Amino acid sequence: MLLFRSEEEVAIWVARTAEPRGQCVPIASVWQLAQLWYRGRLSAAYRGHSAEQAEAIFAAVGLTGEFWRFSSPD
Amino acid sequence: MTATMLTERDWLLRAEIYAHFVALGRAPTAGEMAHHLGSTEGDLQAAFQRLHEAHQILLDEAGAIRMANPLAGQPTDYAVLSSDGRHSGGCCLWANCAWDALGVSAMLAQDARIVAKHPNTGEELHFAVEKGELRAPKSWLVHFALPVRRWYDDLIHT
């Protein structure tokens, strides 16, 4: 997950590296995501995120759709 | 192996790895964790492998910790400095990616200054968390190259 200053910079990177074009998320949303995802990670009580929990965290910051699902719908 | 197959001792070790990682400013070795926990290096290496298979840490080919998300076991393009510019173990902690750089601040519940290397130009990009608030240009964004179902295909590349 790389940091860019604009979508145009992402396009240059994709063209230069032939890496796949995925999804761009505003850095403010990524800060929200980081807090939900990593808060409590140092705790001995941490037991990981299930796929359902992870998808709920994505949805809480507006990241929905097939790209943000751990399994494809059958 | 899934996370639900880990033992309570494995989860305790996970927490100890993270605590040592933050305190040292680098990934602890199996030998260091064995000394700390009064166990053998072989037992710890086997536990490292179980945590790796459950996606709680990522080991390199030599069995050393390469990632304990959001922390990186080696220098990366994302350096995270505590708000006073230093961490107890040295200059900074390294994060695996842009999301993880912010994740270090979130995990530690500490403000941070982040210095990233631009993927195209190599320029330094500076942003921060101050008093719990993100300080970065609103136009900046993070590119997620792969859909989440493919994240564990290749964590280093992801």
Image (tube, coloured by chain):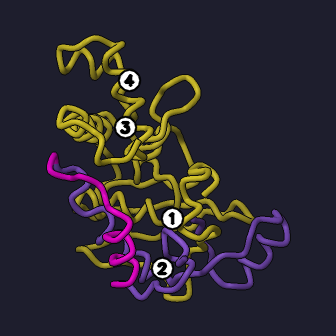
Chain colours: A purple, B yellow
The magenta span reads A44-60
How far apart marks 1 and 2 lie (CA) works out to 9 Å
The disc labelled 1 sits on which kind of residue? Answer: Ala
Nearest to the observer: residue A36 or residue A7: A36
What is the chain letter for disc 4?
B
Sequence-first tag of 3 and 1: 3
Sequence-first tag of 4 and 1: 4
Q: Say which quarter of the image contains residue B49.
A: top left
Same chain, labels 3 and 1: yes
Q: Are marks 1 and 2 in contact (CB under 8 Å)?
A: yes
Q: Say which quarter of the image contains residue A67.
A: bottom right
What is the chain letter for disc 2?
A
Is A48 magenta? The answer is yes
Please state the horizontal and vertical placement of residue B70, each as a whole percent of the image. 40, 53
The residue sitting at 33% across, 13% down in the picture is B41
- Tag in front: 3 or 1: 3
Which residue, given by chain and number where applicable, does mark 2 sit on? A27
Considering the image in quadrants, where does the N terminus of chain B appear?
A: top left
Q: Are marks 4 and 2 in contact (CB under 8 Å)?
A: no
- Tag in front: 2 or 3: 3
How far apart marks 3 and 1 lie (CA) works out to 24 Å
Numbered badge on residue B29: 4
The disc labelled 2 sits on which kind of residue? Answer: Ile
Which residue, given by chain and number where applicable, does mark 1 sit on? B98
Which residue, given by chain and number where applicable, does mark 3 sit on? B51
Same chain, labels 1 and 2: no
